[in-house]
Image (cartoon, coloured by chain):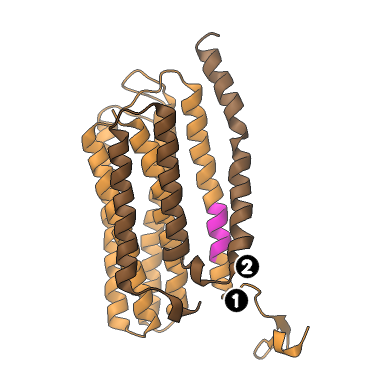
Amino acid sequence: MSSNQEPGMASYAGIVIGLMIIVVIEVILTYQHLPVRTLLFSLLCLSCVEAFVGIMYLMHVKYESPLLFWTVFPATIFVLVLLNYVWPDAYRMARMSLGK
Amino acid sequence: MSESELTMATGHEVLMEASPYAIEKKKLGMWIFIVSDACTFATFLFGYGYMRVGSHNWGRPFEFSSILNGIVMTFVLLSSSLTMLAAVRATQTGQKASASKWLGLTMLLGTVFAILHLREWLKMIGEGWRLFYNPMGGAAQFGATFFSVTGLHLTHVVSGVIALGFIARGYNQGRYNASHVETAGLYWHFVDLVWMFVFPLMYLMNAR
């Protein structure tokens, strides 16, 4: 890690406060009585932003070799995308539980 | 491969290639663990999503007091990431006393998070929630998914607090160095970031 490129503690504090603000936005969105899918999409998008900021800055990936990023993250995201195979069966179960 | 790309292992006369990632082996090992653990958490969360989508009577059990407790837990965990960063920075500049103080504060915040979490669990258990029983009459799977996902995360937090205790002790005794603390910090930040998905999906999506 090249520590001379890293931000100071004040910048880290700013990043953490930014993450806290995103949490507050998530809570506000929750009580706007949005449709479930809209709320889920909004919360997931905000969570992904938090995760990206956390990984890049708090976990210092931004200051590591780009090879680490390109080795770890596309493969992980690929696995997460593959996990979406469960949804057709989940909707089948939902239809069955409603007797359709 | 040029000789400059090779490093000699001390005392064993074994030629080893330099890491292509330009990081220490323990950090690379921690990254591999983090990726596998992220997939474990993702599987649990997808399982929760599967149960929820497949149940027509899921219910929304959390009142605002539980959400408020969750917000406080989130802020405590985020603050602990900041104190962990301060600890890593202190170890990199050789400030032992400061590093011990920040590591101790990180452990304290982790413990506060665990206590708040257990308090929420005890409240739910007091209301009749069980792994396979829903006192509100909705889908029984809520208890199983909620206690599994949050329990897995709580286990990570408690393990992290214990690990940080060992790392802090070893650092003070001179057995561990700044890179050990930094590697432990990676784990701590990961546990923090996982909560950024657990809180909205398990709490906010189930708020009344």
| Residue B126 part of the magenta-drawn span | no
The secondary structure that most of the magenta stretch takes on is helix
Residue occupying the far right of the picture:
B1
> Residue shown at 50%/11% (left/top)?
A98
**Quarter of the N terminus of chain B within the rendering:** bottom right
Residue type, numbered disc 2:
Leu
Residue A6 in the image, given as x and y percentages of width and height: 42, 75
Residue B33 in the image, given as x and y percentages of width and height: 55, 59
Position of residue B101 relative to residue A73, above or below, is: below
* SS type, badge 2: helix
* SS type, badge 1: loop
The residue singled out by tag 1 in the image is B22
> What stretch of residues is rendered in magenta?
B30-37
**Quarter of the C terminus of chain B within the rendering:** top left
From the rendered image, report the letter of the chain displayed in brown. Answer: A
**Residue nearer the viewer, A12 or B74:** A12
Q: Quadrant of residue A19?
A: bottom left
**Residue nearer the viewer, B159 or B68:** B68
Task: Please state the chain letter of the residue tagged with numbered disc 1 in the rendered image.
Answer: B
Q: Residue A67 carries which label?
A: 2
Residue type, numbered disc 1:
Ala
In the image, is B109 to the left or to the right of A82?
Answer: left
Disc 1 to disc 2, how far (Cα)?
A: 9 Å
